[in-house]
Image: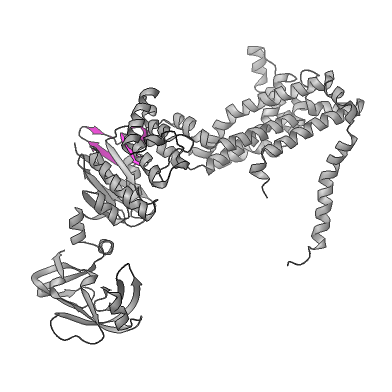
Amino acid sequence: MRSRLPVVLVLPAVAGLAFLLVPLAGLLVETPWATLPSQLFSAEVGQALQLSLICASLATIVCLVLGVPLAWLLARSDLPGRGLLRALVTVPLVLPPVVGGVALLLVLGRRGLVGQYLDQWFGVSLPFTTTGVVLAEAFVAMPFLVISVEGALRAADPRYEEAAATLGASRWLTFRRVTLPGIMPGVVAGTVLCWARALGEFGATITFAGNFPGRTTTMPLAVYLALETDPDAAIVLSIVLLLVSVAVLAGLRDKWIRA
Amino acid sequence: MTLHAELRVQRDDFTLELDLAIEPGEVVALLGPNGAGKTTALRALAGLLTGGRVRVGESTWDDLPAEKRPIGVVFQDYLLFAHMSALDNVAFGLRARGTRKAEANVIALEGLRQVGLAEFARAKPRTLSGGQAQRVALARALATSPELLLLDEPLAALDATTRLRVRSELGRHLQNYPGHTLLVTHDPLDAMVLADRIVILEDGRVVQQGTPREVVRQPRTDYVAHLVGLNFYRGVASGTEVRLDGGGTLTIAEPSEGPVHVVFPPSAVSLFPAKPAGSPRNTWQAVVSGIEQHAHTTRVDLAGSPAVLADITTATVAELRLQPGDTLWVSLKATEIHTYAR
């Protein structure tokens, strides 16, 4: 039999566990369960929820369309400076989202580097629109997808792609028919993570897209605002986000929560 | 038309320099130890590495990438696409080359039927046994009627009993295949049974080539001699005497002159506790350095001048109470020794 667990480790461990779990438990305790359904289907909550789901899903589609090819490029090409590129791609992962929002404003704002031409030539203005929300979410969430898919690609045996080549398949056909089906679990995991990150996005969204109910007020923004005026609504919104997070974890448990 | 290949691959401190000519319908085995460059040669032929100049009649493949070359490859662990059925695997090459789906499926099903797996058309690769997967891989490689069929250790992933069966079956398919075949293997038996001609590669260079019979009878390097299980020496002959380069002298029956290779089977060697009297023309003292039990014989490794391998019966082992370190007398009849010019 092993000796007793050392107290120096157990005490902080228990404290850490409590620190992580008690706030969540508090949220559940404080939830106005009786009025929950009516709150949930109230206009403001419903609107924010709907907007959040739509924007997070659109952002995820943007990330998939751009991120999977990017991951492929990072994993399979012999591009010079690939390591640096990979590091740059992960910057939004560690960057405070509000900084991301500022950066987006500087580039895509009406007087921004790119934004001024979008405005002059096409009359398109992205900040403070629903499109802006999607862009802000995609900016913050895409690294999650790229890293996940790239990891899956690097783990996949490239010899299958060689086998496809010897059978006469072009690189594009090989990617579609051989590579992509092979890394599907990684793509799905990356997509779920990316979607969850987009759904919870706050800093970049409020900076770049502002807070206009029905257009740019997503769930996290609504939670923050409701806390001032209607704490019960804030709790209900939080509960919804908590449930989504738990659902995401449950969906990915095979990948990460194996003991 | 004959296929001519000039393979030149330089990688770090390894150079592959291999010229090959393969006739239509001919099966050439590329045999060599690990690291000799066999797989590199196969990859260069397939266009997966640059450095493979290939000419068949008028057409050259020098600058073609793998997907443009008329080849079929059976990989060592087959590399069947796990998410596709056996039929889709076999049809993949046809589909990639633009054959319509219905037609590709008909051809693929016929291919599966020829390897006896028509009823497994819908099966996923992971539900197939090793032997079945190998046959699907062969059908997939042959489905596009390639001009060059490349086999990379096609039997290495199989267990011993399956291997026997699959080997003879593979031999039958290779006989019926009209194109050029290159078989890469480190197993001499695969090469002997399946190939019309054996090319032996060591350190990126050809050290010997010939029919299986020639290679078995007249090995030219230690590696080949070891593969075919012969005692092998280099020496200089003068009449019926051969002075061996590594020390020792052997008396042979057929007179010869000049530099020669000397071979004899381990089974021709007899061991005695004391110097034998009488007929054998060659006797010398040697020390047992290793004893290894084979199926029906015991192989004894002896250090001496020359060093020698002897296959003796288990009864003899018991009689001699053989131990490593024992000093014995080796006896070898002159008529058992075969010499040929270097």
- Does the segment drawn in magenta span residue B99? no
Work out whether B176 lies above or below A222. Answer: below
Question: What span is colored magenta in the figure?
Answer: B50-73
Which of B80/A156 is in front? B80
Magenta region includes residue B69 = yes
Q: In this view, does B84 lie to the left or right of A113?
A: left
Q: Position of residue B167 (x, y in %)?
A: 30, 49
Q: Quick check: can you spot residue B143?
A: no
Q: Quick one: B62 or A231, which is closer to the camera? A: A231
* A178 to the left or right of B145: right
Give percent across and percent down for residue B46: 33, 40
The answer to whether residue A118 of the structure is visible from this angle is yes
Q: Quarter of the image containing the C terminus of chain B?
A: bottom left
On the image, which quarter does residue A13 sit in?
bottom right
Q: Quadrant of the N terminus of chain B?
A: top left
Q: Where is residue A22 in the image (x, y as percent from the top left)?
A: 85, 44
Camera-side residue of A54 and A29: A29
Q: How many labels does the image show?
A: 0
**Is A72 in front, or is B338?**
B338
Quadrant of the image occupied by residue A10: bottom right
